[in-house]
Amino acid sequence: MKNITLLGATGSIGKSTLSVVDQHSDKFNIFALSANTSWEKMAELCHQYRPKFAVMMDENAASQLQSVINNDTQVLSGEQALCDVAAHEQTDYVMAAIVGSAGMSSALSAARAGKRIMLANKESLVLAGDIFMDAVKRSGAELIPVDSEHSAIFQCLQSGRSGLSKIQLTASGGPFLHTPINELQSITPDEACAHPNWSMGRKISVDSATMMNKGLEVIEAYYLFALKPEQIDVVIHPQSIIHSSVYYKDGSTLSQLGNPDMRSVISYAMAYPRRISAGVAPLDLANNSPLEFYAPDLDKFACLRLAFDALKQGGSAMGTMNAANEVAVDAFLSHKIKFLDVPDVIEKTLNQAQHVTHTSLDEIIANDQSVREIATQIVKQHA
Ligand code: NAD
Ligand code: MG
């Protein structure tokens, strides 16, 4: 029986993780759950899974939760509590599924404590990739990607890296793949969140529509698989059936395919190196044709270009881009700026922020904070 600490339990990845746990309650036990503010949903989960710990990021939400808990679940609050449950000696596996840079310190805590980290929070690697990977190496933690593209590459690489020439991340192109650029400005948040293939939280849905999600994933792949930036390629594949590919020097390409359902990815991370059922229908290739592929348009999807540039620049550029993106997406979701303002805010922030070569986590966190202020000012000029 493996004890799972599920960070971000009330989100989309959280829900899919619980669905896999439900199918294998003989193998996995929910040890701790976390959420930001939604204490009512957390109360339901505590009733159902009876975790040892329930952590609410928000202190008031924790008090509300405490007042309705009628079993022996201990309610905690705040970032340190997240880090503590992630590193708890009884935690075996940590699902890091908090959205945004808010998920970094708890994921890092799991890495330092040598846990199996099932990493959905790609922002951790974008912000602090070197520190994160170093912590994994030092502690002997097992890092298993919970992102469909990176899981695909991880699976393909099980046969080894000999002769590896490049990896290729597939991108659906999001809901506006075929929308002319001059029509993008009037897109609403709900339209941007209506992803054609995947059901996801609102932040990553907007990231998919701008293709910043693919940009973050390029950086995620750079750290996870220790590649050179030029070994990472992106192709648009609107059907999301091929989840990503690995190219070898001998002309061979290995791809991993499946229906777009994160439960396949999550169950793989939980059962690795074995495979277990996930409740996902088998792929029916004959009913998914044709499979299409296109080169990405970096003028239309400027966020992807910005991410490649930030990776090549290195240092604080990736963290700056990530923080500016979080501010811009939040502003777009609350109708303060337009869809095409998102890359604009990020680019202006990158131009205004000071570029530094980070050495410590404190500097990375300080940069994240100061960049948010710059991006917030730029958002105000657009509003
Ligand atoms: P979501 O918005 O559905 O859920 C986010 C979770 O994080 C919720 O439980 C919420 O309570 C918690 N949370 C939000 N802000 C917080 C804060 N400040 N402090 C602590 N907790 C907070 O998001 P999601 O779609 O499940 O995505 C989660 C992560 O997984 C993201 O990093 C995303 O990029 C990544 N991811 C998601 C998918 C997907 O299919 N949804 C696929 C690949 C990767
Ligand atoms: Mg992905």
Image (cartoon, rainbow, N blue to C red):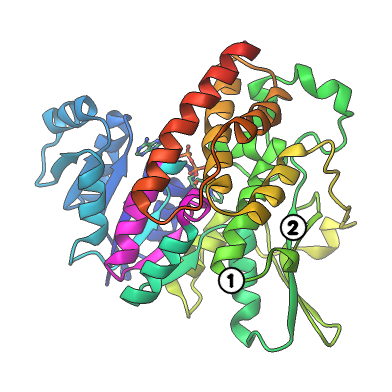
Say whether residue 136 is left or right of residue 322.
Answer: left
Residue 144: image x %, image y %?
48, 68
Q: Nearer the viewer, residue 117 or 270?
A: 117
Type of amino acid under label 2? Thr
Say whether residue 241 is left or right of residue 113.
Answer: right
Quadrant of image for the N terminus = bottom left
Q: What range is drawn magenta here?
A: 102-128
**Going 68% across and 58% down the picture, which residue do you hit?**
259
Q: Mark 2: few, some, or many residues within 10 Å (few <14, many ≥20)? A: many
Where does label 2 land, which residue?
Answer: 170
Q: Is mark 1 on a helix, strand or loop?
A: loop
Residue 341: image x %, image y %?
69, 23
Whether the magenta-drawn stretch holds residue 59 is answered as no
Whether the magenta-drawn stretch holds residue 117 is answered as yes
Q: Do the residues labelled 2 and 1 touch (CB within 8 Å)?
A: no
The mark tally for this picture is 2
Quadrant of image for the C terminus = top right
- Check the image and report above or below for 271 versus 315: below
**Of callouts 2 and 1, the N-terminal one:** 2
Q: Is mark 2 on a helix, strand or loop?
A: strand
From this viewpoint, is residue 24 visible?
Answer: yes
Q: Is the magenta stretch mostly helix, strand or loop?
A: helix
Could you give the CA–CA distance between mark 2 and mark 1, rounded to whole angstroms?
A: 16 Å
Say whether residue 157 is left or right of residue 377.
Answer: right
- Check the image and report above or below for 87 versus 340: below
Where does label 1 land, which residue?
Answer: 225
Q: Which numbered disc, 2 or 1, marks the residue closer to the eye?
A: 1
From this viewpoint, is residue 47 visible?
Answer: no
Type of amino acid under label 1? Phe
- Check the image and report above or below for 9 versus 145: above
